[in-house]
Image (spheres, rainbow, N blue to C red):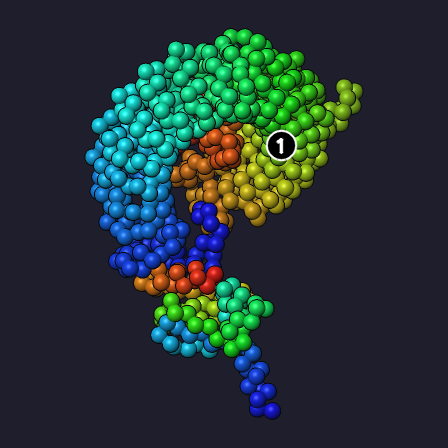
């Protein structure tokens, strides 16, 4: 019974790991906002990412990955009609832009 | 504005927005040198382009550490020595556009010396650049495209360019190059594009053009050349404002067919003989507006013609049969300011089934023509301004019941733009226009129109641009107007009854609409206005004609023709034209006046 529950939970979430090793566990649905992550998780080739539901980003720092995760959730809300602003501090725009570019977000 | 759709929307687009929100935002990231260095070049380009567009680049020192490959600073007046000092450090730069940067001088371009990645450099109309400055350009040995039109260069400087062996495009427009200087360029055998408009090249000098085996684009407008030898690789030729005796004499083997021919304002000595020599069977684009041509017999051989401009030529209905014969593929026809009448349009109907654009401005065409125009199913743009269109007729001489021939336009399911400026159309005649649901631009200008006409147009759901000028429109009439949903520009210039306070009220009600009126503050000009004012529709394609492959993007330069009354009308518009356009307008004035600032 317990293992079954754990399985479904694992199915619905993915773990994103930053350059420094911080782990962000987020809904799979949210992570799929990124075309790159979507490809990794759904490709039939059997990537390690597909099996374990975790992706490591050695190029993306923890604060940037956190911001990315916030964006995933904001993006879901936005597409369901909730009109709020997604604020980006000018200091992180360059780093965030590069990460977003890599993630096809 | 950004060409790359990936950069619009999404998180990348939001980052660019946030990074360039204001000068302060830029200040907060611009010192992140290592990150900037790692930025993919197309992101760096996009970022820089946006900064320049938004004019928030206050100090050139902000340009430090950028991996951009393309920089377009066209027309940015503050660009000077200091800017160039920073630009010189852009080691990845492949393309730099400094056209119209008036402050750029010889010492400024010193900083470009030895930029070996630079392939394309545009210094057009940087008038302070002279022969002395060209030495700096010579150090950029990999340069492939160089624009130096309308700079201070002379023949002496042009001769030096012969050391840039990789050049495939050379734009020398407006420089008074001599035959001898052209001769020294013959070592540039990679040249595909050569622009020599306004030069001192003559018949004696042109045989050297045979030395360029790849030359496909040649512009010798405004020169004294009257006879051009056979140049087998030419596909696009511009001899506007020349006296043309013969083109391609001494015919040899063909390597490429002529596709485009520009002869605006040209004097054809014997057009029939001239066209009998040239192989015109592949010509798709012919512009002979304002030229001496008065019959179109030569069209018989042009089966492929798609774009034909015979405006201001004095052609009559007799010539229309040739257009009709060649007309299967015809997409664009400009016969404005000609002697065409409705009978001529009758001959065209049924023969030009692919015609998308039709200009008949300032002709004697009347309501009868509308029934023939309705038989041209592909039409998207129709200009009937300054014609005798009334928009109503009586059924017969005995039957005084009115009919409204504009309703015939309902058959044109692709019609997007309609110009009825300065016609005799009155309020009630406009009623049938309501059914043109796909209409995006409508131009009206007449003191026969009133509040009623404006209100009639409310249901035009696709209408984005509405010109409603010189009409008897009242304040209350404007305020009661329910604008179509898509409307973004409403041009009310010349509506003299309106008072200042009505504009603020209207803007409050409809903030999405840009109002144009003499009393509504500044009146910015855009492509819509020029498209509507077809009396201005004289394209002068001299230095601006790009070779084939970029058909859609060459800039049509507006030029006012003969009618002085018309010039007076448009002076108002001209004042607001960007500087660069004004320079181009200068092209139409005649070679002696080109230098007048």
Q: Nearer the viewer, residue B75 or B85?
A: B85
Q: Residue B517, percent across and down?
A: 45, 36
In this view of the protein, can residue A44 be seen by the observer?
A: yes
Within the image, what quadrant is residue B203 found in?
top left
- Can you see residue B470? no
Locate the N terminus of chain A and report the quarter of the image it occupies. Answer: bottom right
Q: Residue at x 55, y 28 (%)?
A: B421
Q: Residue at x 24, y 34 (%)?
A: B136
Q: Position of residue B452 (x, y in %)?
A: 60, 37
Residue B465: x and y in percent read: 53, 40
Task: Out of B562 and B233, give the one closest to the viewer.
Answer: B233
Towards the viewer: A99 or B449 = A99
Percent of width and height locating residue B505: 46, 47
Give the mark count.
1
Tell me the residue at 29%/36% (across/down).
B140
Q: Residues within 10 Å of mark 1 (few under 14, many from 20)?
A: some
Image height check: is B47 above or below B144? below
The residue most toward the right is B398
Using the image, determine if residue A2 lies above or below residue B306.
below
B479 to B585, vertically: above or below: below
Q: Is residue B180 above or below residue B579?
A: above
Element marked by disc 1: loop
B194 sits left or right of B365 in the view: left
Query: Which residue of the protein is positioned furthest toward the bottom in this rendering?
Result: A1
Chain containing the residue with disc 1: B
Residue drawn at (63%, 25%) of the image: B304
Residue occupied by mark 1: B356
């Amino acid at each position: 019974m317990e293992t079954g529950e754990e399985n479904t939970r694992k199915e619905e979430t993915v773990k994103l790991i930053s350059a420094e090793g911080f782990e962000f566990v987020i809904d799979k649905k949210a992570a799929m906002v990124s075309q790159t992550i979507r490809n990794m998780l759904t490709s039939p080739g059997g990537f390690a990412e597909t099996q374990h539901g975790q992706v490591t980003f050695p190029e993306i720092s923890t604060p940037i990955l956190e911001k990315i995760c916030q964006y995933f959730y904001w993006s879901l809300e936005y597409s369901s009609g909730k009109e709020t602003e997604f604020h980006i501090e000018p200091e992180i725009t360059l780093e965030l832009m590069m990460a977003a570019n890599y993630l096809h977000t | 504005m950004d060409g790359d759709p990936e950069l619009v929307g999404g998180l990348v687009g939001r980052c660019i927005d946030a990074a360039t929100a204001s000068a302060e935002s830029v200040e907060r990231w611009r010192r992140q040198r290592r990150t900037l260095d790692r930025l993919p070049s197309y992101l760096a380009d996009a970022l820089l382009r946006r900064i320049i567009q938004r004019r928030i680049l206050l100090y050139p020192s902000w340009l430090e550490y950028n991996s951009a490959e393309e920089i377009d600073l066209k027309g940015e007046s503050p660009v000077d020595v200091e800017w160039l000092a920073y630009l010189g450090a852009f080691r990845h730069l492949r393309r730099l556009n400094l056209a119209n940067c008036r402050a750029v001088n010889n010492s400024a371009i010193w900083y470009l010396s030895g930029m070996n990645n630079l392939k394309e450099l545009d210094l057009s109309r940087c008038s302070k650049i002279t022969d002395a400055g060209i030495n700096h350009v010579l150090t950029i040995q990999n340069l492939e495209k160089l624009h130096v039109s309308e700079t201070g260069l002379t023949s002496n400087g042009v001769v030096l360019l012969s050391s840039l062996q990789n050049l495939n495009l050379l734009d020398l427009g407006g420089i008074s190059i001599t035959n001898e200087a052209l001769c020294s360029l013959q070592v540039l055998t990679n040249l595909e594009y050569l622009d020599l408009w306004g030069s001192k090249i003559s018949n004696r000098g042109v045989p050297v053009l045979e030395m360029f085996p790849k030359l496909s684009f040649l512009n010798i407008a405004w020169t004294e050349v009257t006879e051009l030898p056979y140049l087998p690789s030419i596909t696009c030729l511009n001899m506007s404002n020349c006296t043309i005796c013969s083109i391609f004499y001494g015919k040899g083997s063909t390597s490429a067919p002529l596709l485009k021919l520009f002869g605006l304002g040209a004097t054809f000595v014997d057009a029939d003989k001239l066209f009998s020599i040239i192989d015109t069977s592949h010509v798709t684009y012919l512009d002979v507006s304002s030229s001496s041509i008065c019959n179109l017999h030569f069209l018989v051989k042009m089966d492929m013609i798609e774009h034909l401009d015979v405006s201001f030529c004095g052609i009559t209905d007799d010539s229309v049969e040739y257009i009709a014969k060649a007309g299967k593929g015809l997409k664009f026809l400009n016969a404005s300011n000609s002697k065409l009448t409705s009978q001529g349009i009758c001959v065209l109907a049924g023969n030009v089934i692919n015609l998308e654009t039709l200009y008949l401005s300032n002709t004697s065409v009347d309501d009868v023509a509308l029934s023939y125009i309705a038989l041209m199913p592909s039409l998207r743009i129709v200009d009937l301004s300054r014609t005798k269109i009334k928009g109503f007729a009586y059924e017969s001489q005995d039957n005084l019941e009115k009919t409204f021939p504009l309703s015939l336009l309902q058959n044109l399911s692709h019609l997007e733009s309609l110009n009825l400026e300065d016609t005799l159309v009155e309020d009630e005649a406009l009623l049938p226009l309501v059914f043109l649901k796909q209409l995006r631009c409508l131009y009206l200008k007449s003191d026969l129109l009133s509040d009623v006409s404006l209100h009639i147009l409310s249901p035009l759901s696709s209408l984005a641009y509405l010109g409603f000028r010189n009409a008897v429109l009242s304040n209350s009439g404007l305020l009661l107007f329910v604008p179509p949903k898509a409307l973004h520009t409403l041009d009310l210039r010349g509506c003299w009854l309106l008072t200042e306070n009505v504009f603020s009220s209207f803007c409050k009600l409809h903030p999405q609409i840009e109002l144009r009126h003499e009393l509504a503050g500044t009146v910015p000009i855009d492509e819509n206005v020029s498209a509507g004012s077809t009396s201005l529709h004289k394209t002068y394609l001299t230095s601006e004609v790009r070779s084939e492959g970029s058909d859609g993007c060459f800039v049509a330069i507006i030029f006012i023709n003969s009618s002085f009354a018309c010039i007076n009308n448009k002076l108002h518009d001209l004042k607001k034209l960007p500087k660069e356009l004004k320079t181009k307008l200068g092209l139409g004035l005649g070679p002696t006046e080109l230098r007048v600032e």
